Amino acid sequence: MSFYSLQTAIMKDAGRLCKVVVENRGVCEWITDNIPDATEVRDFLEQSPIDLTDIINARLDRLDKARSSNSIFFNEPDYLSSAFLERGLRCSAAVCLLERGFWIEDLIALIKNRSVKDVPELLKRLSEKIDLFSEKFPGESKDVWKDYDKVADALKHERIKERLGQFRDKLKGLSDEEKQRQGTVFIPFATGFLVGKNYLLTNHHVFNEKDKENIKKFVAEFRYEQNALGQNSKPVEYQLDPESFCVSDEQLDYTLIRVKALEDYKKEGLEFPEAGENFGWLPMLMDSTLIAPPVSCCEEVKDIKGVDSERIPYSGLSGEPVFIIQHPRGTQRKIVLFNNQVQNIYQNFLQYQADADFGSSGSPILNSQWQLVGLHHAALVKWDEQKSDEQKLEVQGNLGTRICEIVKHLETRRSEPGVAEFLENKRYVVKQTEQPLKGRIYILVGHLRGDAPSPEHSEQEVTLAKTLLEEIVLFSNQSFEVKDVLQECADKYESGIDYINDQDYQSGDVAIEIRINFDPDALKEKNILSLYYADNMFNYKTYAEIVLQSILSNSPLQFSSGLQSDTATALDLQFCREVKIPCLVMILDFPGNNYTQVLDNQLTPSKSQQRTNPAKGIWKGLESWVKVLSPIGFWAAD
């Protein structure tokens, strides 16, 4: 029996699988025994054709954009930006392995009558639990399982019996809770991925809302991967929370579930308790035109109203590529980049050619811009009774549920607890006519310099800072939400830090305090830009370097610049030390001009002098900062 059918048996769901495939037990057994490289195998019912007008036109628009350069290429351009692989790596961080816990004695009972060759991954997990392959003693690293055909026979081996006995004795002296924890073996089952800072998407056939007790036995394991040097990363596990939020649908084969925050996240080397804040997430896009099927010739297009057949190349269009990030057979994370074209598009599903295996269920399907377009669902098979036994079953490809259809289905359940809250978060669900909200930028001005020449002078500096903030907002775009903290706090500067800390932090949010100093009596020859960061916060110096480099590269003004930690200056930098989200303090010192000169020449230049406005460079610096911190899906189409 194949690894796939064994895992199905462990899930105690083999009967449902057979019923879904066909109403013939013999056919079902033939399928499960002979297709070990499938995920869930289903007999795909014929789908009604859908209107491809918008999808093909969007594809042609993308093609026209790519052809706008003077480059020479065959058929369709295959150029990808140099950031393509970097974006793919960032996307992959949001993908996890879903494992289910089994009491060790239950697992042994399930596999003892199996062939050793059928269950290598399960035996590996069992061996790790009982410390079978210990290198403390000569010869103990040898895999003794391979010496046997049946697991039951291997269990009689002296070393295995000894290790099992020692492990069982150790459990006897533990409390019930500790015994359950140490006696549980986690077995890989499927893949899942984050679609919000604490929301995870996978398949209904992995687990669903009707069996919450079963879900509680699963964990989501992130960072189960190997780096370029062949070193294994340290995985981190999150518990699922079906009691708090869980929505699923069998026909679309999806389950959306909340992920619990990690209490001891700092021990795992993480910066935040929520999974998405550490690993990012893939927003669910309602746009149905982000991926297109093949168009073989112009004749086909003539039947589709609203499509200009003259825009179609003579050779036709191949299906666009899809990229799948997955944990096939429970192995470390893999990405499929080759032989992976869309074959067809139905109302609810994408059909595509791509490698997948058991454990790939619940993987994200992404387009060439790393935008989420589908949820990997099943192998697509066709059964033909007219052919010989060897040819009756034809694997035609794979099926993935379209993300836009999952969002539509969630809308039908909007009245249920928690669904509306998820749908209305623009960082989780992006409507077709909207730009994704990439991050909130909190900007605080209003600091009164204690060593200013006079109180009036200090007030003038605050006015200049407010003016600069207004100019920054003009350069920003609608994808960002810029918060004037002083305005939110009714012009009370001392309330600014509390206001920022009271907000619901999302990955990508940043905060900066901006101060402007000028002193008519000072002998200064250059504009000076200084950035200050909290010395005790990991990565904050890096954030300051990113912002500063971007400002210097994009600012029309020449600045003398510098970075300092909050501990290296006597300045009052309470903002750096008390704001809980990523934060910096920026101080701009202008040469010895009076208030009117700074305002007119530096901050509000005329149109002929617009290029000297420093707000443009500062905005670019803040934009770069948010870009580093935001989930990758927000930036995929840039």
Image: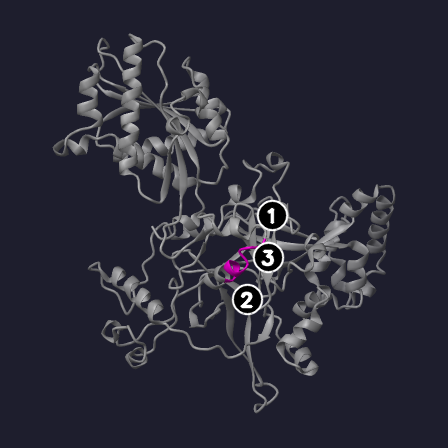
The range drawn in magenta is 409-416
Dot 2 or dot 1: first in sequence order is 2
Quick check: marks 2 and 1 in contact, CB under 8 Å?
A: no
Query: Which residue is the site of mark 2?
Result: 252
Query: Which residue is the site of mark 1?
Result: 259
Q: Residue at x 58, y 38 (%)?
A: 273
Picture layout, residue 9 above or below residue 178: below
Residue 545 on image: x %, y %: 38, 31
Mark 1–mark 3 Cα distance, whole angstroms, equals 13 Å
Residue 181 on image: x %, y %: 76, 46
- Is residue 57 covered in magenta? no
Q: Amino acid at mark 3?
A: Val
Q: Is residue 113 left or right of residue 277?
A: right
Q: Secondary structure at mark 3?
A: strand
| Residue at the limit of the structure toward the bottom, as seen here | 386
Residue 516 on image: x %, y %: 30, 20
Q: Residue at x 32, y 64 (%)?
A: 58
Mark 3–mark 2 Cα distance, whole angstroms, equals 12 Å
Crowd around label 2: few <14 · some 14–19 · many ≥20 (10 Å): many
Q: Is residue 70 visible?
A: yes
Crowd around label 1: few <14 · some 14–19 · many ≥20 (10 Å): many
Q: Is residue 141 visible?
A: no
Question: For residue 378, which quarter of the picture?
Answer: bottom right
Query: Which residue is the site of mark 3?
Result: 247
Dot 1 or dot 3: first in sequence order is 3
Q: Secondary structure at mark 1?
A: loop
